[in-house]
Image: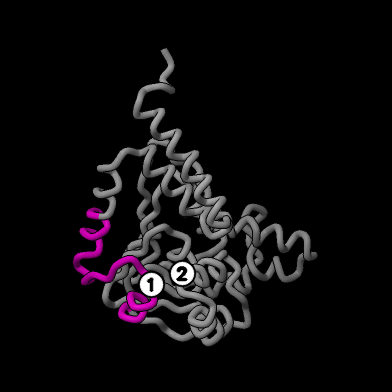
Amino acid sequence: MNRPDKRNAQTPETWLWLTRAVNALPGTVRVLFVRGEGPSFSAGLDRAVFTAEGTDEAPGLFGIAHADQETATAAIASFQQAFDLGSRPGLVSIALVQGYAIGAGFQLALSCDIRIAAQDVQFSMAEVSLGLVPDLGGTKRIVELVGYSKAASICLTGRRVSAEEADQIGLVTAVVPVERLAEAGDAFAAQILALPAAAVTETKALLLAASGRSQDDQQRAEREAQYRQLRALAGLDRED
């Protein structure tokens, strides 16, 4: 994100272009960094969208409020697509978060596989304070990360979460000094890229599906994935 003068505040156009950019990535891309230019990751929603009608491609909140329910929820569904960064098994997304990660900024960080936070980070799910709800996929992701009770204390109050607390409750993968944020991201990426791509993809797919499966079903999926990997290592699935 590159609106440092606005602390990388987001608009529907931001989400439209983020979706397009991620969808355009070739399958050979294995790691995606998500970060904000300047001292903050993203201060959330640009307040200007409250009164903007938007465009045909990216309607503003004013236009959504005046639309019928089917049209309005379809528009929100299109916004949510930009916050689906962790769903592709072959792509590992890493959020490098510093300064403010508020509202939509927080939810964007939550949508990534890995969150590396600078020591100055402040997370906040501030939507409720604006009379809104978090609607970009963040409610399920934060509950899965920190549990219902802790998620409720964060989302129902809009309070700030420091780097220290985020680390303690498992909201982030690591906390580093601000000046080492990019270096830490590169180190994580190097570890991932040093490993066989197919094995990383299969493992991520197992992790993504684990919460929705029983233990027996998960172990069955592990067996099937392992069989595919063993055949690949033995060269049995290569085309002659």
| Quadrant in which the N terminus appears | bottom left
Left of 105 or right of it: where is 212? right
Q: As shown in the figure, which amino acid type bears the numbered disc 2? A: Leu
Q: Can residue 31 be seen in this view?
A: yes
Left of 88 or right of it: where is 51? right
Percent x, y for residue 115? 36, 64
* Residue at the image point whose x is 50% and y is 75% from the top: 147
Q: Is the magenta stretch mostly helix, strand or loop?
A: helix
| Quadrant in which the C terminus appears | top left
Sequence-wise, the earlier of marks 2 and 1 is 2
User: Magenta stretch?
Assistant: 163-187
Percent x, y for residue 88? 48, 47
Percent x, y for residue 175? 27, 71
Helix, strand or loop under label 2: helix
| Residue nearest the observer in this picture, 41 or 51 | 41
Colour mapping used in the image: one colour
* Residue at the image point whose x is 78% and y is 60% from the top: 70
Q: As shown in the figure, which amino acid type bears the numbered disc 1? A: Gly
| Residue count near mark 2 (Cα–Cα under 10 Å), binned few <14, some 14–19, many ≥20 | some
Pick out the residue farthest to the top. Answer: 240
Helix, strand or loop under label 1: loop
* Residue at the image point whose x is 67% and y is 59% from the top: 75
Q: Do tag 2 and tag 1 residues touch (Cβ < 8 Å)?
A: yes
Res 145 label: 2
* Residue 175 belongs to magenta span: yes
The residue beneath circle 1 is: 170
